Image (tube, rainbow, N blue to C red):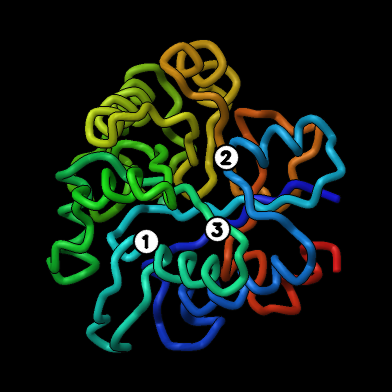
Amino acid sequence: MPAIVLTYHSCNITGHEYSSNDHTALEHDLRTIDSQGFQIVSVQDAITSGLSGSTDSVVALTFDDGPIFDFEDFIHPQFGKQKSFARIMREFTHATGNKAIASSFVIASPSGRQQMDEKDYGGRDWWHDRWWLPATESGLIKIENHSWDHNHRAISVSAQKINQRGQFHNIDTHPECAIEVQKANTYISELVKRSPKFFAYPWGQASNYIYQDYMPNIASKFGLEAAFSTQPKAITPHANKWFLPRFVSGEHWKSTQDLQQLLGG
Ligand SMILES: [Zn+2]
């Protein structure tokens, strides 16, 4: 059986249902994962298991972009009280005795997060980084690297050489990677007192330069061990550790039935 990495976005809330709310989806999915005999493991263990060709059925949980909803309950202005991903994992662990853990891939740039918070979330301070250390210390969530600024459209000036935002394929030179990958790693390390080991390419997009050259030759020297695309596949011994596959909730599966199928049931 395969090693599977699943991805959720805690800011994906356009309703209460499974298909419109990643918090609802995660809560259901933990039960499905458990009932299909999969063990929830760290990202590191899922990679090791997949690359070694182990027959263990393992799932790693990853969360992208890093708003506080990963770790703190909150009141959505339209859809009301929402359980954080952390609470959902704690409740699952309490109910089943099986420990749920995850990794959050966060956007490092404080100004970038502030601009995204203002443009997309009404400036409610939902994208701060004060939750990163408590999350790390809780043992529930490890903080990993999702770039400096995501080369996101909501950010006025990004690391991209001609400020062309909205994709990550065009991050393809050393100076750009030095900001998007290394500067982000340094910032996160200082805040959580632990160096990120994994990188998730924004939108799953990677230039040939970043994953074939920068990651193996430079990023590996400051502590990164692997990077994730969003190719919807299990991790197998053939996978490239600088372009590992993972599935995205709402994109690659949209229901419990989809997830059961994805897990091979
Ligand atoms: Zn992202």
Residue 70 is marked as 1
Please report whichever mark, 3 or 1, sits nearer to the chain's N-terminal start: 1
- Considering only vertical position in the picture, is 225 above or below 202? above
- Considering only vertical position in the picture, is 28 above or below 100? below
Left or right, 131 with reference to 220? left
- Considering only vertical position in the picture, is 198 above or below 133? above
Which residue in the structure is indicated by mark 3? 100
Report the mark closest to the observer, 2 or 1. Answer: 1
- Rounded to the nearest whole Å, what is the CA distance between mark 3 and mark 2? 21 Å
Count residues near mark 3 (Cα–Cα under 10 Å), then give few for <14, some for 14-19, many for 20+: many
What residue is shown at x 58% (from left), y 44% (from top)? 42
What residue is shown at x 74% (from left), y 74% (from top)? 258
Residue 207 is marked as none
Residue 257 percent across, percent down from the top left: 75, 79
- Rounded to the nearest whole Å, what is the CA distance between mark 2 and mark 1? 19 Å
Report the mark closest to the observer, 3 or 1. Answer: 3
Could you tell me the amino acid type at mark 3? Ala
Look at the numbered disc 1 and give the secondary structure of its residue.
Answer: helix
Please report whichever mark, 3 or 2, sits nearer to the chain's N-terminal start: 3
Look at the numbered disc 3 and give the secondary structure of its residue.
Answer: loop
Which residue in the structure is indicated by mark 2? 228
Please report whichever mark, 2 or 1, sits nearer to the chain's N-terminal start: 1
Front one among 172 and 7: 7
Look at the numbered disc 2 and give the secondary structure of its residue.
Answer: strand
Residue 212 percent across, percent down from the top left: 60, 21
